Image (cartoon, rainbow, N blue to C red):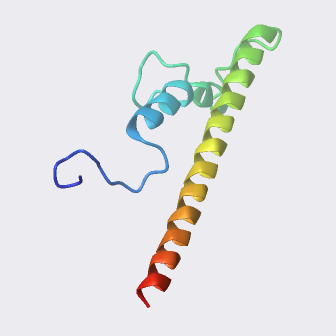
Amino acid sequence: MFDKGWLVKDDHLLSKPERDYFSYYLDNGRFTNGMAYRNHYMHGSTPPVDDDNAHIAAYHTILRLFAILILKIEDDLWLASKTMERSVVIGEAQV
């Protein structure tokens, strides 16, 4: 599958579309029209303090991104444990 180009192997936790999704919401690295919440809050260009709706929207977005990231990590750990279990069973069968 790798030889045919159907699968691509890399060392990232997130796939390219997932990284783009995070980039859209967190910084202007890839998208110039993104939300860039990290940039706003880290560099002092946050909405006014009395604009509760903007802060609540940012808070909900960040919570959603954290949930996605936690689920992605959990999924990768689960897949790794199943792969290790399978390799142990296959290894025992060959002995």
Q: Nearer the viewer, residue 73 or 57?
A: 73
Q: In the displayed structure, would residue 17 be above or below residue 53?
A: below
Residue 4 percent location from the top left of the image: 16, 49
Q: Is residue 71 left or right of residue 55?
A: left
Q: Nearer the viewer, residue 28 or 10?
A: 10
Q: Residue furthest front?
A: 93
Residue at 58% x, 29% y is 39
Residue at 81% x, 11% y is 52
Residue at 55% x, 63% y is 82
Residue 67 percent location from the top left of the image: 68, 36
On-image quarter of the C terminus: bottom left
Residue 55 percent location from the top left of the image: 75, 17
Residue at 41% x, 86% y is 94
**Total numbered badges shown on the rendered structure:** 0
Residue 60 percent location from the top left of the image: 73, 22
Q: Is residue 79 left or right of residue 7?
A: right
Q: Quadrant of residue 29?
A: top left
Q: In the displayed structure, would residue 58 be above or below residue 89?
A: above
Q: Nearer the viewer, residue 73 or 49?
A: 73
Q: Residue furthest bottom?
A: 95
